Amino acid sequence: MKSLIDVGGRCHCGAVEFSAHTDQDIALECNCSICQMGGFIHVLVKAENFSLIAGDEHLTTYRFHTEIAEHTFCNHCGVKPFYKPRSHPHGYSINWRCLPPETRRLFTIKAFDGQNWDENIEHIR
């Protein structure tokens, strides 16, 4: 079993804070429309390994296309620190960019072709 990586992060203004742990040391850079425009880089975690520390009342949710993913944003600063992804609807995707620099160094970033999501999703499940 891989060792767990403890991650903690927040949105830009600090209103939303989270903590989690994962045994994955890969972060995925997706080229789908929302990830590309927002600069989101995915660190996938199981729901039971994720905790919202502060800011539930500051989260706004956006859904599009299949409306499975719950894209959550801070309603103060607009940053998306995590969300419930379509690929893992019972888990979370944490935004690698919302982690402190010393934590980001623990991950290797790999490309994911989200523009062709249906053809590629099995590679990350």
Image: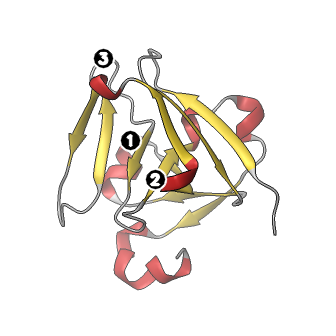
At x 36%, y 63%, the residue is 89
Q: How many marks can you see?
A: 3
Secondary structure under badge 1?
A: helix
**Residue behind mark 1:** 38
Residue 63 percent coordinates (x, y): 19, 51
Marks 2 and 1: which is nearer the front?
2
Residue 29 percent coordinates (x, y): 54, 56
Residue type, label 2: Tyr
At x 35%, y 19%, the residue is 77
Secondary structure under badge 2?
A: strand
Q: Is residue 123 above or below residue 65?
A: below
Q: Which mark is residue 92?
A: 2
Residue type, label 3: His
Of mark 3 and mark 1, the one earlier in the sequence is: 1
Residue 102 percent coordinates (x, y): 77, 32
Residue 32 percent coordinates (x, y): 37, 61
| Foreground pick, 18 / 39 | 18
| Crowd around label 1: few <14 · some 14–19 · many ≥20 (10 Å) | few
Of mark 3 and mark 2, the one earlier in the sequence is: 3
**Residue behind mark 3:** 76
In space, the residues marked 2 and 1 are separated at their CA atoms by 17 Å
Q: Is residue 113 above or below residue 52?
A: below
Is the C-beta separation of discs 2 and 1 under 8 Å? no
In space, the residues marked 3 and 2 are separated at their CA atoms by 21 Å
